Amino acid sequence: MGKLGEAGLAATAGPARTLGMEGECRASQARSWGLPAGGAGGDSPGGDAPLPGSISSSSLLQAEVLDLDEDEDDLEVFSKDASLMDMNSFSPLMPTSPLSMINQVKFEDEPDLKDLFITVDEPESHVTTIETFITYRIITKTSRGEFDSSEFEVRRRYQDFLWLKEKLEEAHPTLIIPPLPEKFIVKGMVERFNDDFIETRRKALHKFLNRIADHPTLTFNEDFKIFLTAQASEFSSHKKQGPGLLSRMGQSVRAVALSMRGVKSRPEEFMEMNNFIEIFSQKINLIDKISQRIYKEEREYLDEMKEYGPIHILWSASEEDLADTLKSVASCIDKCCKATEKRMSGFSEALLPVVHEYALYSEMLMLTEEIGKLEDKVECANNALKADWERWKQNMQNDIKSAFTNMAEENILYYEQCLATWESFLTSQTDLHLEEASEDKL
Amino acid sequence: MEQAAPDPERLWQPAPLEPLSHPDAGLESMVGEETKGARDEGPGDGTMTENNFSLKKIEISVSEAEKRTGRNAMNMQETYTAYLIETRSVEHNDGQSVLTDSLWRRYSEFELLRNYLLVYYPHIVVPPLPEKRAEFVWHKLSADNMDPDFVERRRIGLENFLLRVASHPILCRDKIFYLFLTQEGNWKETVNETGFQLKADSRLKALNATFRVKNPDKRFIELKHYSDELQSVISHLLRVRARVADRLYGVYKVHGNYGRVFSEWSAIEKEMGDGLQSAGHHMDVYASSIDDILEDEEHYADQLKEYLFYAEALRAVCRKHELMQYDLEMAAQDLASKKQQCEELATGTVRTFSLKGMTTKLFGQETPEQREARIKMLEEQIKEGEQQLKSKNLEGREFVRNAWADIERFKEQKNHDLKEALISYAVMQISMCKKGIQVWTNAKECFSKM
């Protein structure tokens, strides 16, 4: 960590994004880019409104998209505008320093290098006179020498995670710190502590700690160790040591960095990184939104389907000859409902958390690399950032790839299950028909 | 076995060689006709083997729809759609079809035809017309009558109607129907000349009026219940289906957004770029595939709708029977009371109330001559009443017999058609699943190459 520059404690200029400080990581709010119908900041002239009425074959060619809610301004109806393709291609950052090469090798999923295993589970509600909050159990298993024992169990609440993140940011301002799940409830939920929300948060917290554990540098951070191992009283007294001068400086450095955007001339590498991050941030946030929307639509589809099957049963009660066929149809629809539920749960397990995490990551990247620009006098800091950047990028590609591959697999499985259901219905109906026909002949 | 409707080939009896049924002939002559027809009917597919008429295969199609403007009854300009009806006869030997008639009709003329059939064949479950206004629409479908998709589906529905009538063993021989297909001008006047509107029982329009029938026919009561249930359950099904279609549309279309974003993102990625781009393309394919899928499903919905409207036709037959029964009971009651009166006058005992009786009591006895005259009048009325009752009874029995024959025919048709519709629904689902598997398999390949 080099000099933090002569920026001093100058006041903030521009939009104050208090990312991570108070923990308001509301990725869905922080937008600096315009309508996505164009490229970075462009506007698409293409078809906004859905075609009136008809779905005649001529309209099939138009990639017509649903009109989404008002707050989801960024997911517009669009038409495939050829001009969108005309984007400048950016050549990616090529690792040049030996340090970054080494770091590139250490990927997240290499089990032989892992010596720290962390799980986050058992959310528990605590009620006091002033507040209600949830703690999570954290179990750590390790073979590292610097740990006093090989197994630890502690309880932490969200606030504690926030503290840890701040400490890490303060200690490693040039590194990419994993994101925390949002502090506040995403819109649409009624209770603060409903089960889905707690479970989503638990999974995200689990991911957070494991990302730190897998990071070549962060994993050895002292505060991290204390977080994982200290019992309640020891931990709270450690926390009380308060954010140092350094962290306060860190905050203002970030603020200055924001205001100095565009001022200094930067090396080309950072230009490229900057562009990548900006566009990536746009896209990943969109994908996050799209994915959430798909989940919502599927949920609503499932609700309607659940009503659809039983009507056939109701009808079968008034019929004689048709009764069996109607009941079979109802049972097929029910089976497809179950398959839909399965697909949805797979979607929410694999794709949604990954995409959301990267959306949160992208928020931070927009800031972290600002710090990197200030450091460009210091060789070491440059390389640390670059190395971490490369590492991060590689992980991102792997994670995205596997998340989407998984989604495709879930969809294939879903359609295969439904196909089997309807095909067996069809067979049973034709068999019946042949049976009846042969009976008639007798 | 009755064939399902969309079969364009029907054996059809040209009726002009028969005199038009006299409007006042009522049921009796028709009864005669029907029993004759029933005897002559071959395998029950409408084949007429009467040796008076030549065998010809007739094809009917509603081949085109056209927007027209004209002036209505109040001399105001209006826009309407006209449908081209083409009739072809197929030569028995070489199977070639020759266009024999072609004319344009609008929806209101179809309605007129149907109303006529309802009056003249009250015991028949008359095939329904496609809906007048679009109902059960999901959000992407237009409720506008002038919308080309609606017009197209209506064209198919009208063709279906004509084929149903043409394949009905009794309705197919009706002259007005024949003229509908062959006589463009003056057809409306011809129909009105039959005076069928006068014949129509206005009480039938009062759908909710109840007529207390003392001895209701159990079978008709059950049938009425069934038609109510069928109507209710199919409406419910159609409503939910429309909502399901809406939701499914949403799911597919949102995936289209992936396509766009992936392709934009691919521009900044080196290794992932190609995979993202091609995966994005498959997402677009996926999103646009829903349009065809739902269009097919709309035809399925139309098949269900036909039977929704058939339920009404079924109920109409029950209603007519109810009225007939009611009239019969009223006539019997009236007769009984007249007989009673007569008896009392003859024996001098007054048991039933009559105004004449009361006034006689109050204002003095009537003369024996007067009494004789009244008795004689009553006796005549009784005689008339007895005859009427007898013919009403006969009418009633014939109605029931013929109605049940048609109801049985209808039941078989319904079971067959609906089963086919449900099977076609399964076929559609299968096709949708296969498309889905293909698209996602392609997408998966792209993702795994990223």
Image: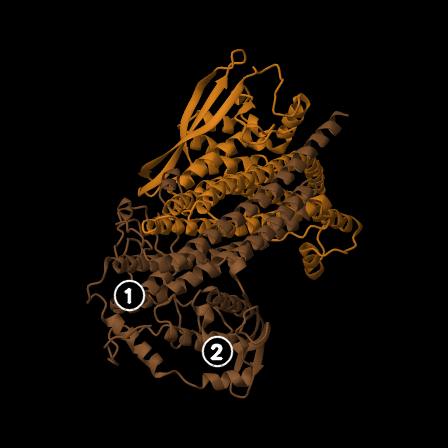
> Which quarter shows the C terminus of chain A?
top right
Residue A302 visible, this orientation: yes
In this picture, is A374 found above or below B100?
below
Amino acid on which disc 2 is placed? Asp
| Quadrant housing residue A184 | bottom left
User: Is B213 displayed left or right of A175 in the figure?
Assistant: right
User: Is B239 displayed left or right of B338 in the figure?
Assistant: left
Q: Which residue is mark 1?
A: A379
Amino acid on which disc 1 is placed? Glu
Q: Which shade is chain B?
A: orange
Structural crowding at the residue carrying mark 2, measured as other residues with C-alpha within 10 Å and reported as few (<14), some (14–19) or many (≥20): some
Q: Residue furthest bottom?
A: A129
As helix, strand or loop, the secondary structure at mark 1 comes to: helix
Residue B7, percent across and down? 54, 27
Q: Chain letter of disc 1? A: A
Residue A419, percent across and down? 58, 42
Residue A72 visible, this orientation: no
Q: Which chain is brown?
A: A
| Quadrant housing residue A325 | top right
> Which quarter shows the N terminus of chain A?
bottom left
How far apart are labels 2 and 1 at the CA level? 34 Å
N-term mark: 2 or 1: 2
Residue A160 badge: 2
Residue B167 badge: none
Nearer to the camera, B347 or A170 = A170
